[in-house]
Image (cartoon, grey):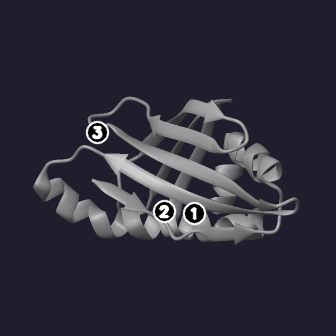
Amino acid sequence: MNLESPKINVDKSSQDVFNFLTDIKNFKTLMPENISKFEVLDEDKFLFALKGMPEIVLKKKEVIPPSKIVLGAAGGKIDFSLIATIRETSDASSEVKLDFTGDFNPMMAMMIKSPISKFIETLATNIPHAI
């Protein structure tokens, strides 16, 4: 399953956006209002839970300055990635898009498609306000 957020324009350089997103404690400011738990486990890993959903642990898997950050599931039964792609549009602005990729059976994919789509859209739209 592949889902993507809308492209979001940010009035910051790609390096500024990259620096913000590589500091995982900043993801707390991007989370939706229905977050029930957020905990930084170490400098590359955090745990979060949304109301009514199981806890999810994300870990930095790949970092390509200043254009790409890949967070992946750390443990658990489901393997997926959240990929932030940053493209510079000028010296003082950039564009960010989040992609979610995961290998799910058709029933699971059908159940999580809408909540995950909404989740990555919320993360993306919160970026310009958080930086």
Report the residue at 63% width, 33% height from top.
63
Can you give x and y, in whole percent of width and height, for residue 39 in the image?
60, 42
* Number of residues whose C-alpha sits closer than 10 Å to that of mark 2, classed few (under 14), some (14–19) or many (20 or more): many
**Total labels drawn:** 3
Can you give x and y, in whole percent of width and height, for residue 17 in the image?
76, 53
Asked where in the image residue 108 lies, by quadrant, the reply is bottom left
* Residue identifier under label 3: 78
* Residue identifier under label 2: 120
Q: Residue furthest right?
A: 91
For the residues labelled 1 and 2, the Cα–Cα distance comes to 5 Å
Assign a secondary structure to mark 2.
Answer: helix
Report the residue at 12% width, 57% height from top.
107
Can you give x and y, in whole percent of width and height, for residue 97 in the image?
56, 60
Report the residue at 87% width, 62% height from top.
92
Q: Do the residues bearing badges 3 and 1 touch, measured as CB atoms within 8 Å?
A: no
Q: Earlier in the sequence, mark 3 or mark 1?
A: 3
* Along the viewing direction, whichever of 48 and 70 lies nearer the viewer: 70
Please state if 11 lies on the left or on the right of 123 as rendered.
Answer: right
Report the residue at 43% width, 70% height from top.
118
Assign a secondary structure to mark 1.
Answer: helix
Report the disc number at residue 123: 1
Q: Do the residues bearing badges 1 and 2 touch, measured as CB atoms within 8 Å?
A: yes
